[in-house]
Each structure stands twice: as C-alpha cells, then as structure tokens.
C-alpha cells in the first residue's frame, strides 16, 4: 500500500513538472518574441531616421532636429516597454526554474524512499519464505 502511495506521489510530481515545463516553454517563446520585436523596432527606427535625414537634413535643419528628436523619444519609449516586458519574463522564468528544481528535489527523495521500501519488502519477503 505504501509503495502505491509513493507511486501516486511521483506521478503527481511528474504532472507538475510537465505543467511547469509547458509554462517555461511559453515564457521562453515570449522572450524570443521580445528579442524579435526589439530587432524589428530598431530596423523601423533606422528607416525613419534615414527618411528624415534624406528629406530634411540639408533643406530644413530645424525640422530635421525636431523630427529626429521625436523619433528618438518614441523609439526609447518602445524599447523601455520591451525591456520591462523582458524583465517580467526573466523573473517568471527564474520562478518557474526554481519550482522545477524544488520538484526535482522532492521527486528524488520520494524515489529513494520508494527504492528503500521495495528493497525492504523484498528482503523481508525473502526472509519469511
């Protein structure tokens, strides 16, 4: 009976690990998406700065400065939002990894207990025959 309870506990840990790994995969995909979004925003910013330069730099320096500054502020705001999101994802990733390590530790101790119980049952069973 005790062995079956230990098996159930181990199965519960396996299920929890699976759920945590699923969440961890999702977080990692979000981190990949944030990196992609950063690259796309940088490319968009570069294109805008190039357009502003070729359109206004020589003909209207004041408008060039104004548009460049506005574009830079928008870009910094977008990067700040993405960085904030990345920090949240990193915290969530660390939290999930900690939970996973904790479950692995519990699972290891229950596995050792199971092995001990099986060994004891086998030893006592052999001595009784």
Image: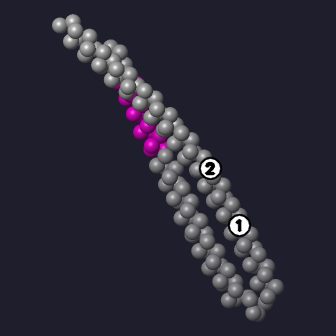
Q: Is there any visible trace of residue 15 in the rendered image?
A: yes
Distance (Cα) linking label 1 and label 2: 18 Å
Instruction: Give the structural element (helix, strand or loop) at label 1.
Output: helix
- Circle 1 packing at 10 Å, graded few (<14), some (14-19), many (20+), is some
Which mark is drawn over residue 76? 1
Displayed quadrant of residue 80: bottom right
Left or right: 72 in relation to 120: right
Residue 122 spot, x, y in % from top left: 25, 16
Stretch in magenta = 7-23
Residue 72 appears left or right of 93: right
The secondary structure type at the circle numbered 2 is helix
Residue at the spot x=41%, y=30% of the render?
A: 108
| Residue drawn at 75 percent across, 73 percent down | 70
Q: Return the disc, 1 or 2, that comes first in the chain's sequence.
A: 1
Residue at the far top in the pictured view? 128
The percent coordinates of residue 121 (x first, y second) are: 28, 14
Please tell me in which quadrant of the rendered image residue 63 appears.
bottom right
Q: Quadrant of the C terminus?
A: top left
* Picture disc at residue 88: 2
């Amino acid at each position: 009976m005790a062995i079956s309870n230990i098996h159930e506990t181990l199965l519960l840990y396996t299920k929890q690990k699976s759920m945590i790994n699923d969440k961890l995969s999702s977080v990692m995909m979000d981190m990949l998406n944030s990196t992609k979004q950063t690259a796309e925003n940088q490319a968009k910013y570069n294109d805008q700065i190039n357009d502003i330069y070729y359109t206004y730099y020589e003909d209207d320096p004041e408008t060039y400065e104004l548009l460049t500054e506005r574009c830079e502020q928008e870009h910094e705001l977008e990067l700040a939002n993405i960085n904030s999101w990345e920090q949240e994802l990193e915290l969530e990733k660390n939290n999930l990894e900690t939970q996973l390590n904790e479950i692995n530790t519990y699972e290891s101790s229950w596995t050792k207990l199971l092995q001990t119980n099986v060994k004891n049952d086998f030893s006592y069973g052999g001595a009784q025959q």
